[in-house]
Image (tube, coloured by chain):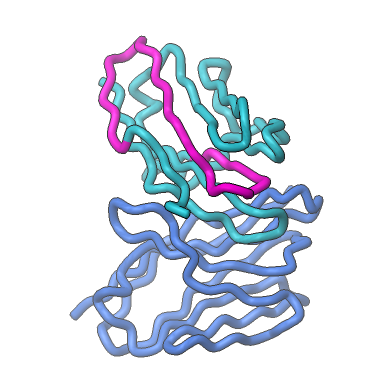
Chain colours: A blue, B cyan
């Protein structure tokens, strides 16, 4: 079946780079997404990548896509304490039904 | 547009009572999703609609849960009777076909 996997927890020091990884089993997604959830809030779209790209850079964020290995990653440069949150990757399922499948979320802890 | 609007933001109810959660999607969006988030199980898709029609309700935990979308601008998720294990944050989200999902702020449900 369709599945999206992420590691559950990542801890880094302020100023370091963070890399959050995601693998998926199958997808018809034109776009692949990263969402951010801050405490007590809903998920908000952070960034996305078009499926025919292998890299997208957006200020401190870099998204890498390896379609062959079905691997998506989010790199945050110069991580700040305000980046502490849960990060979700999401893809559309293979059956093109519009269903958006989320990973379990990676909790990023940034230590001062 | 004000985004996806959910009500109430918080709900505390006694076991056995009926609970109704409400959602107003973004105008023009084709898809509406109901998710549940808990510490133990992460973010779970309960049910989603396309053009007001339920497409996949395989994530609905049991018959106590039901969801309706009587028109394009309103959906409800009902739990009857509620149980303490239903305590969670319930999110509604909407999207265009193939697009990213916009989330509401969630309803925090506590069943005592």
Relative placement, left or right, of B83 versus A34 is left
Residue A60: give x, y in percent of width and height. 42, 87
Q: Is residue A42 above or below residue B53?
A: below
| B68 vs B58, nearest the viewer | B68
Q: Give the residue displayed 49% in from the left and 65% down from the top.
A: A45
Q: Give the residue displayed 68% in from the left and 69% down from the top.
A: A31
B18 drawn magenta:
yes
Q: Give the residue displayed 29% in from the left and 89% down from the top.
A: A15
Q: Is residue B17 above or below residue B37?
A: above
Q: Give the residue displayed 63% in from the left and 38% down from the top.
A: B48
| B24 vs A6, nearest the viewer | B24
The part of the chain drawn in magenta is B9-35
A62 drawn magenta:
no
Indicate the quadrant containing the C terminus of chain A: top left, top right, bottom left or bottom right. bottom left
- Name the residue at the right extreme: A95
| A34 vs B54, nearest the viewer | B54
Residue A50: give x, y in percent of width and height. 69, 76
Residue A80: give x, y in percent of width and height. 28, 81
| B9 vs B90, nearest the viewer | B9
């Amino acid at each position: 079946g369709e599945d999206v996997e992420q590691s559950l927890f990542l801890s880094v020091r302020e100023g370091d780079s963070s890399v959050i990884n995601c693998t998926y089993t199958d997808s018809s997604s034109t776009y692949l997404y990263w969402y951010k959830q801050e405490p007590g809030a809903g998920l908000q779209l952070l960034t996305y990548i078009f499926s025919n790209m292998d890299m997208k850079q957006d200020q401190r964020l870099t998204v890498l896509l390896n379609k062959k290995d079905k691997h998506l990653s989010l790199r945050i440069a110069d991580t700040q304490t305000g980046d502490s949150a849960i990060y979700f990757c999401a893809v559309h399922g293979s059956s093109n039904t519009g269903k958006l499948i989320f990973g379990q979320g990676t909790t990023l802890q940034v230590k001062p | 547009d004000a985004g996806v609007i959910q009500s109430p933001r918080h709900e505390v109810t006694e076991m056995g009572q009926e609970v109704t959660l409400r959602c107003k999607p973004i105008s023009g969006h084709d898809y509406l999703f109901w998710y549940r988030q808990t510490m133990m199980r992460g973010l779970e898709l309960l049910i989603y609609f396309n053009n007001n029609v339920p497409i996949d309700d395989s994530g609905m935990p049991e018959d106590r849960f039901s969801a309706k979308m009587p028109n394009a601008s309103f959906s409800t998720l009902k739990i009857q009777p509620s149980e303490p294990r239903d305590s969670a944050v319930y999110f509604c989200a909407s999207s265009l076909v193939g697009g990213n999902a916009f989330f509401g702020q969630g309803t925090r449900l506590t069943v005592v």
